[in-house]
Image (cartoon, rainbow, N blue to C red):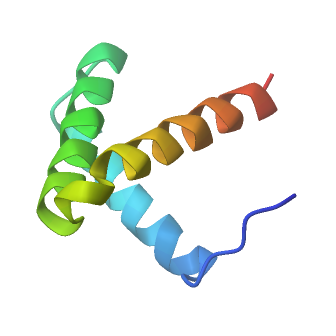
Amino acid sequence: MPVTSKYSDKQVEAILNDMINVLEKHHAPADLSLMVVGDLATNIINNNVAKGQREAIAAKFAAALSYSVKEQQ
Protein backbone atom coordinates (compact mmCIF):
# COMPACT_ATOMS: atom_id res chain seq x y z
CA MET A 1 0.00 0.00 0.00
CA PRO A 2 1.50 3.37 -0.95
CA VAL A 3 2.16 5.80 1.83
CA THR A 4 0.48 9.18 1.50
CA SER A 5 2.10 12.30 2.83
CA LYS A 6 0.80 15.67 3.95
CA TYR A 7 3.85 17.19 2.22
CA SER A 8 4.01 17.83 -1.50
CA ASP A 9 6.42 15.91 -3.69
CA LYS A 10 7.83 19.28 -4.76
CA GLN A 11 8.65 20.25 -1.16
CA VAL A 12 10.22 16.87 -0.41
CA GLU A 13 12.28 16.95 -3.60
CA ALA A 14 13.52 20.49 -2.90
CA ILE A 15 14.76 19.57 0.59
CA LEU A 16 16.25 16.30 -0.65
CA ASN A 17 18.14 18.12 -3.41
CA ASP A 18 19.49 20.64 -0.87
CA MET A 19 20.73 17.84 1.36
CA ILE A 20 22.31 15.98 -1.56
CA ASN A 21 24.05 19.19 -2.65
CA VAL A 22 25.56 19.61 0.83
CA LEU A 23 26.88 16.03 0.84
CA GLU A 24 28.31 16.49 -2.65
CA LYS A 25 29.88 19.82 -1.65
CA HIS A 26 31.79 17.98 1.08
CA HIS A 27 32.64 15.06 -1.23
CA ALA A 28 31.08 12.74 1.35
CA PRO A 29 31.39 9.06 0.40
CA ALA A 30 28.42 6.74 0.96
CA ASP A 31 29.47 5.62 4.45
CA LEU A 32 29.94 9.18 5.71
CA SER A 33 26.69 10.29 4.06
CA LEU A 34 24.79 7.49 5.79
CA MET A 35 26.42 8.31 9.12
CA VAL A 36 25.39 11.96 8.77
CA VAL A 37 21.83 11.05 7.75
CA GLY A 38 21.61 8.63 10.68
CA ASP A 39 22.85 11.28 13.10
CA LEU A 40 20.35 13.74 11.64
CA ALA A 41 17.49 11.25 12.12
CA THR A 42 18.60 10.64 15.72
CA ASN A 43 18.75 14.38 16.38
CA ILE A 44 15.28 14.95 14.91
CA ILE A 45 13.77 12.11 16.95
CA ASN A 46 15.48 13.13 20.20
CA ASN A 47 14.53 16.80 19.84
CA ASN A 48 11.00 16.49 18.45
CA VAL A 49 9.48 13.26 19.78
CA ALA A 50 8.39 12.58 23.35
CA LYS A 51 10.74 10.21 25.22
CA GLY A 52 8.10 7.52 25.51
CA GLN A 53 7.57 7.43 21.74
CA ARG A 54 11.15 7.60 20.48
CA GLU A 55 11.83 3.87 20.22
CA ALA A 56 8.55 3.25 18.39
CA ILE A 57 9.23 6.08 15.93
CA ALA A 58 12.80 4.85 15.36
CA ALA A 59 11.50 1.31 14.73
CA LYS A 60 8.92 2.60 12.23
CA PHE A 61 11.60 4.68 10.52
CA ALA A 62 13.91 1.66 10.29
CA ALA A 63 11.11 -0.52 8.93
CA ALA A 64 10.19 2.10 6.32
CA LEU A 65 13.84 2.39 5.28
CA SER A 66 14.17 -1.37 4.98
CA TYR A 67 10.95 -1.57 2.95
CA SER A 68 12.08 1.18 0.58
CA VAL A 69 15.39 -0.60 -0.03
CA LYS A 70 13.61 -3.86 -0.78
CA GLU A 71 11.29 -2.09 -3.21
CA GLN A 72 14.32 -0.89 -5.22
CA GLN A 73 15.62 -4.42 -5.84
Residue 17 relative to residue 13: left or right: left
Q: Quadrant of residue 30?
A: top left
Q: Is residue 38 above or below residue 52?
A: above
Can residue 72 be seen in the rendering of this structure? no
User: Of residues 14 and 6, which is closer to you in this image?
Assistant: 6
Residue 2 relative to residue 34: left or right: right
Give me the residue at 19% from left, 67% from top.
48
User: Of residues 46 and 16, which is closer to you in this image?
Assistant: 46
Q: Quadrant of residue 27?
A: top left
Q: Can you give x and y, in whole percent of width and height, for residue 59 in the image?
A: 46, 39
Q: Can you give x and y, in whole percent of width and height, for residue 22 in the image?
A: 22, 47
Say which quadrant the C terminus sits in. top right
The number of numbered badges drawn on the structure is 0
Q: Quadrant of residue 35?
A: top left
From this viewpoint, which residue is outermost toward the front? 52
Can residue 43 be seen in the rendering of this structure? yes
Q: Can you give x and y, in whole percent of width and height, for residue 19 in the image?
A: 30, 52
Q: Can you give x and y, in whole percent of width and height, for residue 6 in the image?
A: 58, 84
From this viewpoint, which residue is outermost toward the right? 1
User: Of residues 73 and 10, which is closer to you in this image?
Assistant: 73
Q: Is residue 68 above or below residue 5?
A: above
Give me the residue at 29% from left, 38% from top.
37
Say which quadrant the N terminus sits in. bottom right
Residue 63 relative to residue 51: left or right: right
Give me the residue at 51% from left, 66% from top.
13
Give me the residue at 32% from left, 60% from top.
18
